[in-house]
Amino acid sequence: DAGVIQSPRHEVTEMGQEVTLRCKPISGHDYLFWYRQTMMRGLELLIYFNNNVPIDDSGMPEDRFSAKMPNASFSTLKIQPSEPRDSAVYFCASTGQGTGELFFGEGSRLTVL
Amino acid sequence: EDQVTQSPEALRLQEGESSSLNCSYTVSGLRGLFWYRQDPGKGPEFLFTLYSAGEEKEKERLKATLTKKESFLHITAPKPEDSATYLCAVQGSGGGADGLTFGKGTHLIIQP
């Protein structure tokens, strides 16, 4: 199995630009999670989906962040406009049946200048 | 709000020197406590799930234990390849609770 696939692996952009991060979950998994990791705050849950429906987006920091899951094999996390404080590693993870055994992608490292 | 606190933040051991990592938690209705391993530049990798106080799980040189307030990850006779950041997480039973709440991790270095 290919595992969870994220792209891009690295993104460097300037403040004010739009950023789109992409995720392909493991086939058959019905839960998809977006996490953000920083040294200061650790891993923070941003939003998660069940069967392509957003269930809890209370972790999304502000309206500049949005996430979609148009089908079972694809999700995006968009930041518009981006700010330097958004710099972090963004992880996508998937699992089946709501278990806590999450399968993480290798992350997208975002740097906003 | 679920909370997870891990200690120490960093730990340096000699190869073969056993030790324990601590995870203290508060959660409304524990559905599970999880340990993950994270290598530099990689996503976290699942190690163990514990569901109730008194439960123990083992894998090679690692053993995880659980009480009502904390969990320990015991590392016996570690090797340099055990060097990584170890993350603890909880899953509660509150609304929208399928997501895990993670601690900040313990960065473990095993010196040859």
Image (cartoon, rainbow, N blue to C red):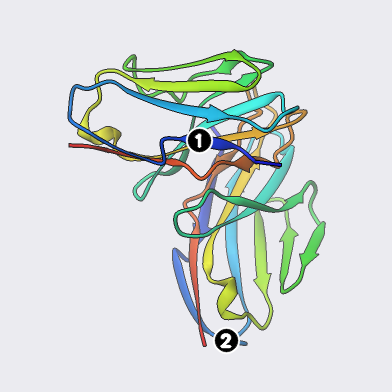
Q: Is residue A54 above or below residue B28?
A: above
Asked if disc 1 and disc 2 are in contact, CB closer than 8 Å, the reply is: no
Circle 1 SS class: strand
- The circle drawn on residue A110 is none
Camera-nearest residue between B34 and A104? A104
Q: Are marks 1 and 2 on the same chain?
A: no
Which residue appears farthest toward the front when viewing the image? A2
Place of residue B57 in the rendered image (x, y in percent of width and height, measured from the top left):
80, 61
Q: Quadrant of residue A29?
A: top right
Q: What residue is rendered at 53% in x and 21% in y?
A: A75
Q: From the top left corner, tell me how far across and down residue A35 is, in percent.
A: 49, 35
> Which chain is indicated by disc 1?
A
Q: Mark 2 — residue?
A: B15
**How busy is the neighbourhood of tag 1: few (under 14 within 10 Å), some, or many (20 plus)?**
many
Taking B78 as reference, is A81 left or right?
Answer: left
Q: Nearer the viewer, mark 1 or mark 2?
A: 1
How far across and how far down the image is residue A32, in percent?
61, 27
- Host chain of mark 2: B
Asked whether, in this view, residue A37 is left or right of residue B75, the answer is left
Judge the density around disc 2: few (<14), some (14-19), many (≥20) Cα neighbours within 10 Å.
Answer: some
Query: Which amino acid does the dot numbered 2 rest on?
Result: Glu
Q: Which residue is mark 1?
A: A6
Give the amino acid type for the residue marked by disc 1 in the picture. Gln
Q: Residue at 52% across / 88% down in the picture?
A: B112
At numbered mark 2, what does the secondary structure look like: helix, strand or loop? loop
